[in-house]
Image: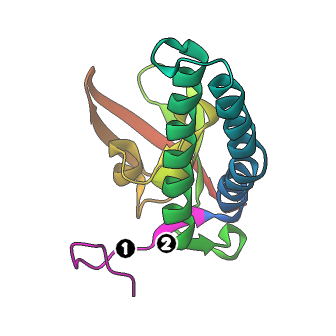
Amino acid sequence: MKLHPTGDVMDKIPLTAKGFQKLDAELRQLKSEDRPAVIRAIAEAREHGDLSENAEYHAAREQQSHIEGRIKELEAIIGLADVIDVAKLSGTVKFGATVELVDEDTDEEKTYQIVGEPEADIEAGLLNLKSPLARALIGKEEGDSIEVRTPGGVKAYEILSVKFI
């Protein structure tokens, strides 16, 4: 059990194997390529003299701050990762499910995989487990209808299929 610096128990972060690999690859890239490159850029900018008016130096330091922050964020996520083999799951909608929906008003079909927050990307069809739509889908099955309150009003969907791939 991990504790937050405040003493609170920190929850595990559910990730698909694919999501874990993507975050792990980003972390390795940041540590092996991006961090050394920005350190070189800072060293080169320092050689240009007066740091108070050195735009390259300040930009490189800002980039270094961003990289170090992202490294810490990724290390924390990976440290708390609970990697779930989605292919071993079945049944009703839950984490990892790929759900095909149809909007009951427009007949528009959409497909989403329900994933943990760190790997969510709505444009790529990766739906945050904590989103209103995902919460409405959890526990439902093929053929069920759901209603979701959105900023634009209530949307109704029918679940066409639930797969674990």
Which image quarter: residue 82? bottom right
- Does the magenta run of residues contain 12? yes
Q: Quadrant of the C terminus?
A: bottom right
Vertical relation: 111 (above or below) 78 = above
- Tag 2: amino acid: Leu
Q: Which residue is mark 1?
A: 11
Vertical relation: 127 (above or below) 59 = below
Q: Is residue 26 left or right of residue 6?
A: right
* Residue 111 percent across, percent down from the top left: 61, 39
Q: How many marks?
A: 2
Secondary structure of the residue carrying tag 2 is loop
Disc 1: CA contacts within 10 A as few (<14), some (14-19) or many (>=20)? few
Q: Which residue is mark 2?
A: 80
- Does the magenta run of residues contain 70? no
Q: Coloring scheme of the render? A: rainbow
Q: Answer whether labels 2 and 1 touch (C-beta < 8 Å).
A: yes
156, 52: nearer the viewer? 52
Of all residues shown, which one is farthest toward the bottom?
Answer: 1
Which image quarter: residue 15? bottom right
Vertical relation: 145 (above or below) 97 = above
At horizontal 51% and vertical 21% (from top left) the residue drawn is 51
Q: Which residues are magenta?
A: 1-15
* Residue 107 percent across, percent down from the top left: 52, 23
Secondary structure of the residue carrying tag 1 is loop
Mark found first going from the N terminus, 2 or 1: 1
Magenta segment main secondary structure: loop
- Residue 9 showing in the rendered view: yes
138, 147: nearer the viewer? 138
